Image: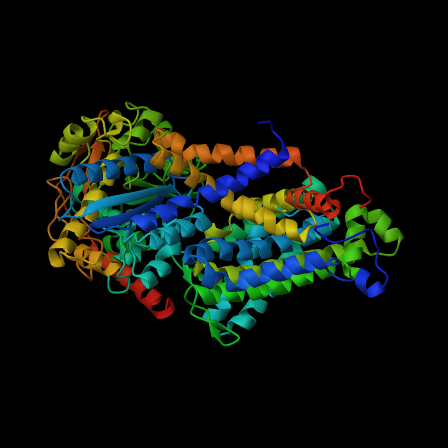
Amino acid sequence: MSLTRRNILTGAAVAALASQLPLRVALAQGGDKVVRIAMPMDFTKVYTFVTAEYNQGQRDYITMMNQRGGMGGYTIAVDISDHANDQPRAIEAYERAKSQGAVLVDPLSTPVARALTPRALEDKLNMVTAFSGRSDAADGTVFPYVFPLSPNYWTQAGLLIEYFKQQDGGSLDGKTICFVHIDTPFGKEPLPVLEALAAKEGFKLQAFPYTPPGNDQSAIWPQVRRARPDWTMFWGAGVGQTVALTEAARNGLDMGRVCSSVWLSESDMDVVGRDQTVGVLKFEPCVSGREPKVIQDILTEVVGAGKGAGPEDKVGTSYYNYGVMLAALMLEGVRRAAEIAPDGPVTGEWLNAGLNSITEFTAEGLIPPTTITPEDHQGGGMGRVARWNGEVFEPMTDWFSANQDVVWDEVRKYSSEFAKTGQ
Amino acid sequence: MIYRRAGISFTRYQDERRLWKLPTDRWAVIVIFALLLVAPFLVDRLFVVGYLLPLIIWSMAAMGLNLLMGGAGQIHLGYGAVIGIGAYASVHAMRAGLPFELAMIVGGLASAAIGVVFGAAALRVKGLYLAMATLAMQYIVDFVIVQVPAISGGTQAALSVPRTSFLGIAIQGDRAPYYVALALCAVLTLFMLNVRRTSFGRALAAVREKDYAASIIGVDPFRYKLLAFWVSSFIGGMTGAVLAVCYYRTISPDQFHLDLSIQLVAMVIVGGLGSVLGGFLGVGLILFAPIVLNQLIGLAADQFGVAIPTDLRAHLPLMLYGGLIMGFLLLEPLGLAKIYSNIRNYLLVWPFRHARQ
């Protein structure tokens, strides 16, 4: 076939029509005892390897549980697509998921989750917004169908400040804490909580915004050094994190007093240099590494059987384990839902009841005991601080939670505003 | 034969002046519009909410930009910001209690007022330099929205759009937003089709071709360049309001970044500069090719067991998309509208090939 206009146009038309086939197939298949979960995520634009590792963990865990016979008799069907952080594509993916009968959507993107929130609430379609989306969605009374299921950024910031306080002998009075953040809504999010804590604990908070995406932060970090911080928090995602660490090391900051949110992983350390960053701290929502029983089980039952969703060396990395954590929580929700109403029907409400009744769930030691209630969709806000030792992140504390009063003040402030104007 | 024309030219001025001169074209427009009207009752809701609605709204934006780029020959790399201003202004107006009809006008006026300030750069600079000036607008507007909590809506930077109605129809559910957008788009399309036949449209064309020449024949480039920016920004602002109310329902700064501006410029160029139909075709291609390609690759991977790694699975559609755009531009630099017009010209005289057109 030669490359003529006619062939190209015909080809394009046929391709466009053919792509609509899977929807029909999926609609036709809609058999019973299947719980559909849609995962439109950003594999290509901003989050890239973060999504790949996170999603790999989710899929491996779901594969394992399906092999074991599903959750409460229900098989989990996962639909993965790429929304590239582009909202029309994400909305299309969401609407497609809704048409296909999905009862849970996990977009793993803050802008997308924020945009989808009114739709999810209206359609009664559960949306997981782990480490993304609106922090005030922790308030389940206002956001009944939005589930962060993980410590939000306010909790992470509050917990880190508590750790600093413990390390400095129980008081932060007169200390200087620098907050280096990407200059986007996401980066500025912890500021109100940090300001409230600064007033309460008496430390001096200095914020240093850098322009997105954060490829160049060389102007910021010398200023941070001049501020002589007692502690430094850096808040970003993707490329900004590795650049921040590089600059922190270059400016001679004490790595043991530099700290990140959840978005720091072994892959970042490979970029900056595993030995250059020894001592750096991060917030950890779940155990990293391959020791937890779930990860061991995945290694034998899924990866060992050649059914792994991605490269084997990523198994047990931080983001992979986040994926396993969230998949475990989602599937625990399915299991609970099947307990409450064994015969379904599988709807958003059905799964919602299950997710809302997750109690003291630890995923066999992978995550801190997590309880989801209709009021608290964050799950208690527990985590721990981990230190990079050049090889792995080693825990510095036990699971704990801190400053939840300040966090919940902030949560209620924004959720009540949403309740007032969002309808 | 298909168009039932046998070389007879028009015998009356009023026939020559019609928007669609051939009966076949008129029928095609009527049928397509009728199909669009009944679409929510004919096809799956996904196609209405996920495809037709964004197609209509993005087409409105593309038409607004096309007036400036294709009509007046002024490049604009900050049109996303123009839409953003309209969206934010109208949503704030609605939150303050204004009805949607008025809020839309407020959005349009806000965009037009700010857009024309940056458009004033066009009085001094042209081409690439104007591109830089409008690019600056994009970044300044982005910056202001993100930095002022009163505009962006606090730390969550997500501003919910209040429930509203248009001419008594509550905008909720799947169908109402679609019909509201369709009605506004129809009005805008008629305006765009007619504007080129007015003295305003002709003056813009004169400025587009050569501004010295335009001023020699008595068209004031100062006035018409500013007017072009004003009208185009007004349309952009109204589109922003429609986008916020009918489609996004929550607005956040990232919806109006440079990506949107570039996407719109691409839509206008791929569709065909200066063509109204091209706007629709360009939007269809740029907006949906990535989605459709993604599903195709997904289909191939799932149904036919083509084993491709996750990374490639995610990036292959992007490669194909890039190739597709390059292919279209190589084969037909004048855009999709020209491809349509070629097909139409071929059919006009079919089955003959060399008849007078």
As displayed, is residue A107 above or below residue A252?
A: below
Write down the quadrant of residue A223 in the picture: top left
Percent x, y of residue A4: 63, 31
Residue situated in front as seen by the camera: B276 or A205: B276
Residue lying at 76% horizontally and 57% vertically, measured from the top left: B201
Quadrant occupied by the C terminus of chain A: bottom left
User: Is B265 placed left or right of A80 in the picture?
Assistant: right
Residue situated in front as seen by the camera: B306 or A157: B306
As displayed, is residue A421 above or below residue A364?
A: below
As displayed, is residue A78 above or below residue B104?
A: above
Quadrant occupied by the N terminus of chain A: top right
User: Is A127 placed left or right of B238 in the picture?
Assistant: left
User: Is A280 placed left or right of A337 in the picture?
Assistant: right
As displayed, is residue B289 above or below residue B194?
A: above
Percent x, y of residue A154: 28, 51
Write down the quadrant of residue B265 in the picture: top right
> Can residue A164 be seen in this snapshot?
no
**Tally of numbered tags:** 0
> Can residue A3 be seen in this snapshot?
yes
User: Is A339 placed left or right of A189 in the picture?
Assistant: left
**Which residue ends up furthest to the bottom in the rendered image?**
B168
Residue lying at 31% horizontally and 47% vertically, measured from the top left: A38
